[in-house]
């Protein structure tokens, strides 16, 4: 965490807190209030939606929950205004967590579906508020609620409250971005399933981000209720709130904590530049045009665009750092006993049995080859063991502990890592950050700085050290496969599952990979690998397990198993089996 | 709470059917664009209202039949839709970003409408406005009946086009996997432009129907967004008949809710339906 950013934010906030004593015309204080109000709202939206990619169109609901909590408590129950603000945050958070607890459990509700669902929730909430005594229809007047005298003028007080909220939200957004939570959310943004399998507790992280986001929106709503002093459902729960915060965040850049604040300042300034005279319409049209231009020409947003330009200049001069951290060799004393045992494991997809009661034992320190014809259940076995799919029935014991019913991220914590047949890197994270994320969230659970050192070690191990700072898009297939490997190894797993790492590589690259897999085992990690390249299978495997139609066909030393007639028949058909013997 | 009479309920259901047909008609182009072009076109609502205002203007200044204005309006919006989609293609806008770009377009069109026709409510005066007839105990308003007929005709026509013609098959193939469809000789870019134009022309037809029976105001553009999206999602993205069926289901259940409770409760029906559907069967959407 960079202390200078925190100090700069606090110092900037303290300096801006002096504005009410400059005795500017009230008009300016109100405009500055609105700027800070939107900074707070947009930043709060971004903590869930920008970081994790779950675009919420329901920010109006959480904002509205805050507005109405303050309006009801201060307007109808005569609570002191400042005391209503924690309540506004609490109600908005409660609403968000209740919603998230349901919605985030449904795997398929992502992207556009999440956006629509949250929008629908806004309208349902608005209808309930409108038709119950919370509002009842006529709206709530708050002009009688006393405004605490924090500043010489009333607009000054609102300005100070919004300033505190804006600075607070920026500090939170910055802290989140630099924390494990932030790294996890960015991983979710790029590939949620891969993130979960790598060890990111995706459900809890999304819920935590939503809770933070809602609490801040609730505070913004509470303050705004008194600022506008007359609240109606039509205004509060309109589609304008979510669309405006999205516009601001996207314009400024959703992948940077400061992006939404920059966007909010620009848009609010733009809108108010046009209020002088009768130019509101021109303002609206200009905002639309700015939005279109921003998306078309700067889809990443203003802040990342500026940072990229600044970062591009000095990078050329620096030689790539070569630092290999010493690696602690895991104990090999237990070599040979059972590491993982699958018992009567089944997995069916809508009636198709991909695994039909399989018993497989993996011994500590071995390289186990898992082979079989296409559709025999090899990849399904890896997907079930890693928790990507839940098992239909049966058990999996890892180091004596039952893991078949665990969430994927818990299996990763237990010490199992995997690669995907088609590499699934996090597209917006650099190669180093891809590997560092695995070191942070997998079984190793390293701190951010140690994870980066660990990442450099594994990048050197896989020969990717000179690619550490590029995005995965810039890698070729061979390098992407090795990135998958580095990511799996960085969590220091005791068992690594390799799903066709050699597929698509040329003979020289296969030789590289075979040597690499040997070194992985020599470093103490047990390896299970699914493969079709028979040269590599025979070269690498201590033992072979052959699957066919989701059942165990053969098991044993590589040379013995390959001789068996039923194995040859399963691979090449019965005619060939007959010819050969 | 007393239950209203059977006649009142039947009349409510009928008006629900009519307004549901309009939900379906607006949703038709929106869903096709979303499902087959992966463009979530928020500007569809702005197109609908711009067409409604144009129809209002043409009828007020020349006095021609509102339905005849489509001869001018539909091709105009076809071109507009093509132009917008050209932009989306040119910059390879992602589905989520398409929502934002088209929101920008909506803001511009809304400002334009307000500049030309002001923020006041406008109502099309034509010989359709008061036309209605009695069917048993029920009143059947003619403009709404026209809307229902147009919605049915267009939905079925597009359903047949997608299902039974080579053009329709090419469109569906391109939506499933554009590069593979291109490899099989589908000119995906041109097809997409044509479809985007068609969707905008459908928005224009919906706008003319809207102007027959609803008062117009620029702010009303957003009033339709939620419920029409609900109809599209429930009906299935890219489906031709789905939005109409779902729209009518929503319209009728809203109307019955209004008759039994109070009009202000109406929105809860469509959105609760939508939320339930998203949570229970998200893979269908």
Image (cartoon, grey):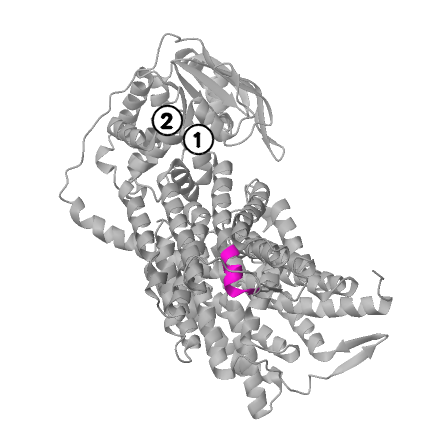
Q: First in sequence, mark 1 or 2: give its number.
A: 1
Q: Chain of mark 2?
A: A
Specify the quadrant that holds the N terminus of chain A.
top left
- Tell me: A111 left or right of A484: right
The vertical placement of A309 against B122, above or below, is: above
- Name the foreground residue: A63 vs B145: A63
As drawn, the label of residue B31 is none
Residue A272 in the image: x percent, y percent?
A: 39, 70
- Name the foreground residue: A561 vs A409: A409
Could you tell me how many numbered marks the image carries?
2
The vertical placement of B118 against A25, above or below, is: below
Secondary structure under the numbered disc 1 in the rendered image = loop
Residue A456 in the image: x percent, y percent?
A: 26, 30
Dominant secondary structure, magenta: helix
Q: Which residues are magenta?
A: A222-230
The vertical placement of A506 against A340, above or below, is: below
- Tell me: B24 left or right of A60: right
Secondary structure under the numbered disc 2 in the rendered image = loop
- Tell me: A324 left or right of A426: left
Q: Name the residue that disc number 2 marks.
A: A491
Mark 2 closeness class: few <14, some 14–19, many ≥20 residues within 10 Å? many
Furthest-left residue in this view: A317
Per the image, is B181 magenta? no
Residue A572 visible in image: no
* Residue shown at the point (52%, 55%) measured from the top left: A222
The quarter holding residue A186 reads: top left
Mark 1 closeness class: few <14, some 14–19, many ≥20 residues within 10 Å? many
Q: Chain of mark 1?
A: A
Per the image, is A227 magenta? yes
As drawn, the label of residue A199 is 1
Residue B278 in the image: x percent, y percent?
A: 60, 49
């Amino acid at each position: 965490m960079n202390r200078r950013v925190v100090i700069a934010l606090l110092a900037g906030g303290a300096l801006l807190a002096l504005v009410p004593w400059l005795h500017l015309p009230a008009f300016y204080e109100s405009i500055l209030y609105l700027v800070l109000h939107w900074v707070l709202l947009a930043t709060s939206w971004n903590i869930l939606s920008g970081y994790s990619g779950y675009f919420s169109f329901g920010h109006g609901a959480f904002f509205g929950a805050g507005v109405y909590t303050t309006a009801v408590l201060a307007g109808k129950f005569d609570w002191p205004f400042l005391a209503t603000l924690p309540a506004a945050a609490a109600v908005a958070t409660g609403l968000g967590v209740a919603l998230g607890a349901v919605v985030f459990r449904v795997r398929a509700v992502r992207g556009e579906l999440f956006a629509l669902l949250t929008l629908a929730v806004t309208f349902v909430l608005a209808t309930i508020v409108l038709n119950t005594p919370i509002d009842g229809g006529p709206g709530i007047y708050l002009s009688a609620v006393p405004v605490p005298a924090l500043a010489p003028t009333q607009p000054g007080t609102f300005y100070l409250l919004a300033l505190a909220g804006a600075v607070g939200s920026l500090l939170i957004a910055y802290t989140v971005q630099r924390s494990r939570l932030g790294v996890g959310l960015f991983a979710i943004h790029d590939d949620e399933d891969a993130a979960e399998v790598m060890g990111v507790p995706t459900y809890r992280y999304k819920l935590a981000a939503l809770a933070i986001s809602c609490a801040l929106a609730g505070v913004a709503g509470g303050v705004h209720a008194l600022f506008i002093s007359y609240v109606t459902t039509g205004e509060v729960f309109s589609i304008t709130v979510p669309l405006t915060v999205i516009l601001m965040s996207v314009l400024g850049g959703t992948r940077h904590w400061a992006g939404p604040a920059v966007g909010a300042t620009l848009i609010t300034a733009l809108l108010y530049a046009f209020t002088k005279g009768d130019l509101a319409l021109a303002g609206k049209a200009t905002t639309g045009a700015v939005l279109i231009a921003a998306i078309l020409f700067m889809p990443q947003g203003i802040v990342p665009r500026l940072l990229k330009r600044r970062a591009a200049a000095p990078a050329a001069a620096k030689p790539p750092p070569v630092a290999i951290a010493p690696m602690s060799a895991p104990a090999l004393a237990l070599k040979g006993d059972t590491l993982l045992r699958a018992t009567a494991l089944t997995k069916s997809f809508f009636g198709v049995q991909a695994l039909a009661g399989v018993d497989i034992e993996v011994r500590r320190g071995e390289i186990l080859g898992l082979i079989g014809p296409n559709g025999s259940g090899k990849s399904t076995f890896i997907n079930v063991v890693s928790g990507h799919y839940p098992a239909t029935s049966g058990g999996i014991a890892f180091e004596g502990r039952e893991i078949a019913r665990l969430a994927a991220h818990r299996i990763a914590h237990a010490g199992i890592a995997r690669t995907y047949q088609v590499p699934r890197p996090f597209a917006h994270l650099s190669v180093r950050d891809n590997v560092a994320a695995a070191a942070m969230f997998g079984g190793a659970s390293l701190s951010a700085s140690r994870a980066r050192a660990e990442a450099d070690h594994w990048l050197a191990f896989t020969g990717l050290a000179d690619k550490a700072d590029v995005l995965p898009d810039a890698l070729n297939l061979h390098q992407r496969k090795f990135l998958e490997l580095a990511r799996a190894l960085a969590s220091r797993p005791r068992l690594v599952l390799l799903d066709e790492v050699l597929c698509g590589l040329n003979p020289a690259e296969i030789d590289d990979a075979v040597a690499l897999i040997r070194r992985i085992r020599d470093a103490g990690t047990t390896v299970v690998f699914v493969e079709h390249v028979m040269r590599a299978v025979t070269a690498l495997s201590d033992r072979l397990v052959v699957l066919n139609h989701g059942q165990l066909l053969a098991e044993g030393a590589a040379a013995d198993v390959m001789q068996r007639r039923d194995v040859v028949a399963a691979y090449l058909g019965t005619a060939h089996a007959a010819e050969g013997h | 709470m007393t239950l209203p009479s059977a006649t009142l309920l039947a009349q409510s259901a009928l008006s629900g059917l009519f307004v549901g047909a309009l939900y379906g008609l607006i949703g038709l182009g929106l869903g096709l664009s979303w499902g087959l072009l992966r463009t979530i076109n928020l500007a569809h609502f702005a197109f609908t209202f711009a067409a409604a205002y144009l129809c209002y203007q043409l009828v007020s200044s020349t006095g021609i039949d509102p339905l005849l204005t489509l001869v001018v309006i539909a091709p105009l919006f076809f071109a507009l839709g093509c132009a917008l989609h050209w932009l989306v293609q040119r910059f390879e806008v992602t589905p989520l970003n398409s929502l934002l770009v088209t929101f920008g377009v909506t803001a511009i069109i809304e400002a334009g409408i307000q500049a030309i026709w002001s923020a006041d409510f406008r109502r099309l005066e034509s010989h359709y406005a008061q036309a209605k007839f009695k069917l048993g105990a029920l009143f059947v308003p003619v403009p709404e009946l026209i809307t229902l007929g147009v919605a049915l005709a267009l939905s079925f026509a597009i359903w047949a086009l997608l299902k039974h013609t080579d053009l329709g098959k090419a469109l569906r193939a391109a939506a499933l996997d554009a590069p593979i469809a291109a490899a099989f000789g589908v000119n995906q870019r041109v097809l997409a432009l044509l479809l985007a134009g068609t969707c905008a022309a459908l928005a224009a037809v919906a706008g003319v129907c809207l102007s027959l029976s609803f008062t117009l105001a620029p702010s009303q553009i957003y009033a339709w967004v939620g419920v029409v999206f609900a109809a599209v999602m429930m009906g299935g993205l890219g489906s031709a008949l789905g939005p109409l069926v779902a729209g009518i289901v929503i319209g009728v259940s809203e109307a019955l809710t209004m008759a039994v409770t109070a009009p202000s409760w109406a929105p809860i029906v469509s959105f609760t339906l939508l939320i339930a559907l998203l949570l229970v069967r998200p893979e269908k959407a």
